[in-house]
Image (cartoon, rainbow, N blue to C red):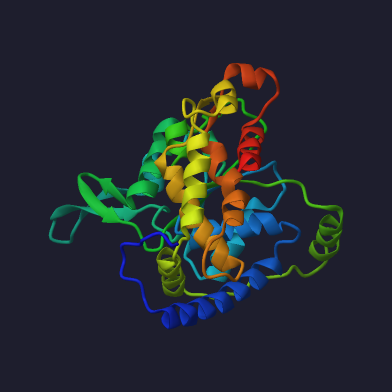
Amino acid sequence: MTAIIKDAAPSEADMVAEAERALADISRIRDGVGRVIFGQESVIERSLVALLAGGHALLVGVPGLAKTKLVETLGIVLGLDARRIQFTPDLMPSDILGSEVLEQSEAGRRSFRFIPGPIFAQLLMADEINRASPRTQSALLQSMQEYHVTVAGQRHDLPSPFHVLATQNPLEQEGTYPLPEAQLDRFLMQIDILYPELEAERRILLETTGTEDARAANVLTPQRLKEIQLLIRRMPVPESVVETILKLVRSARPGQGNGDTDKHVAWGPGPRASQALTLCARARALYEGRLAPSVDDVKALAEPVLQHRMALTFAARAEGMTVRDAVARLVKAL
């Protein structure tokens, strides 16, 4: 049994033909990114899944793990207009959104002209987003949700597609402004970047310390990316996958009959987490070469989709438990 989708679904033959085209494009994307980023297959997969699903992602990792290089490479490979903002405590909202300047014509007539800020890009890297003030963070995160900015009462739409890949350093938390939980929910996924494996690090040493570095090449256009995103939203979702998502997300909320959650979780994910899991499961299925998501997709994406949408109780944190541990227990219970 398959869940009902409100959009008028194309014929099965058209879906298969579109999916085959998309699979060829995704394969070229993977190869293009893999030539520059070594040993981070899981991170590459999750980052591309977030973009294919049409969302934003938060990359969390210590310095030197190629977070900036990854975003730069994705922008080149996907053909997106990419820009980078280094967040600092003195960064103002106008430094991101843009501002109006007063101009005077040769005739002496004065008028205001809007100068767009760096947020007017198709792929924006918000580097160390937790170092900016809450006011500046809010300006960016509101734009991520509404896809437009308002300056001096005038609305200015952002480019399409529009994606934000923000980075956060888990070290050196002095003088930072951690993102509030309600604003973290704007990110489709939180992607933890770990240290590379031995062989991957060996390859990094050999291929990035010579006279020539591997360079990314463009393989896609923004319009083609939007077509793939639309295809993903049209993919059918089996009823078993819908039930698994509902069971997983609801079991992560206190007061829903799960004793382990009631004991360790202070508050759990809302319906936006279910929406994110559904979209990401579809995107991962296509990324893996399938035309419909499976329960395995839900299990694989539970951690990056749920971990920033939950909080543990003080007692659970005192015991050394992490949100990742709590999500792993819920997945195992499935």
Q: Residue at x 50, y 61 (%)?
A: 282
Q: Residue at x 45, y 74 (%)?
A: 224
User: How many numbered markers are drawn?
Assistant: 0
Considering only vertical position in the picture, is 246 above or below 296?
above
Considering only vertical position in the picture, is 44 above or below 129?
below
Position in image of residue 185 (x %, y %):
45, 40
Position in image of residue 221 (x %, y %):
47, 74
Position in image of residue 295 (x %, y %):
57, 54
Q: Residue at x 61, y 64 (%)?
A: 73
Q: Quadrant of residue 190?
A: top right
Q: Quadrant of residue 69?
A: bottom right
Q: Nearer the viewer, residue 15 or 206?
A: 15
Which residue is at the far front? 1
Q: Is residue 238 shown left or right of residue 200?
A: left
Q: Is residue 246 shown left or right of residue 168?
A: left
Query: Can you see residue 202?
Result: yes
Query: Can you see residue 76?
Result: no
